Amino acid sequence: MSDFLKTAGVAFIVLGTGAGTVSVMNEDLPDLTVPALPWEASGALDGRIFATKDTIEETGEVIHDTLRFFEGRFQSARAQVYCDFGWTEYQTWLEEDVVHFTTTTLCEDAPHTVVWYGTVRGDAILLEGTWTTRRWYWTQQTLVTGIGQSALVAHSTPRI
């Protein structure tokens, strides 16, 4: 058998089985690192709604969002429109007059993970997060930081 046919046969076997894709895959990117605190599901932010102005760090693009906390769950209106993340349990840690919160939201229809970490002091919220999309052939991540104010207190029951 000629060297050309041998090489073609090996290439066909390697590429045909997917073994060749390993060399073109991107390495995974870690999600946002959340501080190691004694987190608990306290519902400390239940009934709160925040209007936020967020910045995508990679591009400087400014986006507006509404964050809701209800019955121990969290929802980002903007993320909900993009992909049906639904309501996700959140955890808090209280430090004097500051409520730290974190949650990890997952999209059921696509490989999107958003890790949120923020602080609430009075009516002000500061947050950061990573939106990571993991596919077998690439991983894309967006870092977001934001600030906002309490929009109102929820008196009606949202659909969960």
Image: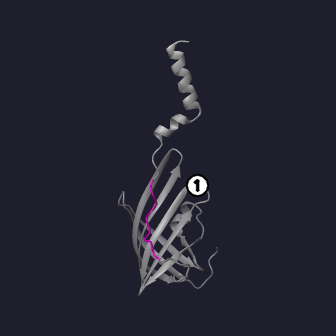
Q: Looking at the magenta stretch, what is its main secondary structure?
A: loop
State which quarter of the image contains the C terminus. bottom right
Q: Position of residue 149 (x, y in %)?
A: 42, 79
Is residue 32 a member of the stretch shown in magenta? yes
Most foreground residue, 140 or 3:
3
Question: Compared with residue 7, is residue 19 higher up or lower down, i.e. above or below?
Answer: below
Q: Position of residue 22 (x, y in %)?
A: 50, 39
State which quarter of the image contains the N terminus. top right
Task: Please name the residue shown 50% across and 54% down the image.
Answer: 133
Q: Amino acid at mark 1?
A: Ala
Task: Please name the residue shown 35% across and 60% down the image.
Answer: 60
Residue identifier under label 1:
110
Task: Please name the residue shown 54% across and 74% down the image.
Answer: 90
Is residue 17 a member of the stretch shown in magenta? no
Q: Position of residue 29 (x, y in %)?
A: 45, 54
Relative horizontal placement of residue 12, taking residue 30 as reference (left or right): right
Kindly give the residue lying farthest to the left in the view shown: 60
Q: Quadrant of residue 128?
A: bottom left
Task: Please name the residue shown 50% across and 63% down the image.
Answer: 114
User: Which residues fall within the magenta stretch?
Assistant: 29-37
Secondary-structure class at tag 1: loop
Relative horizontal placement of residue 51, taking residue 160 as reference (left or right): left
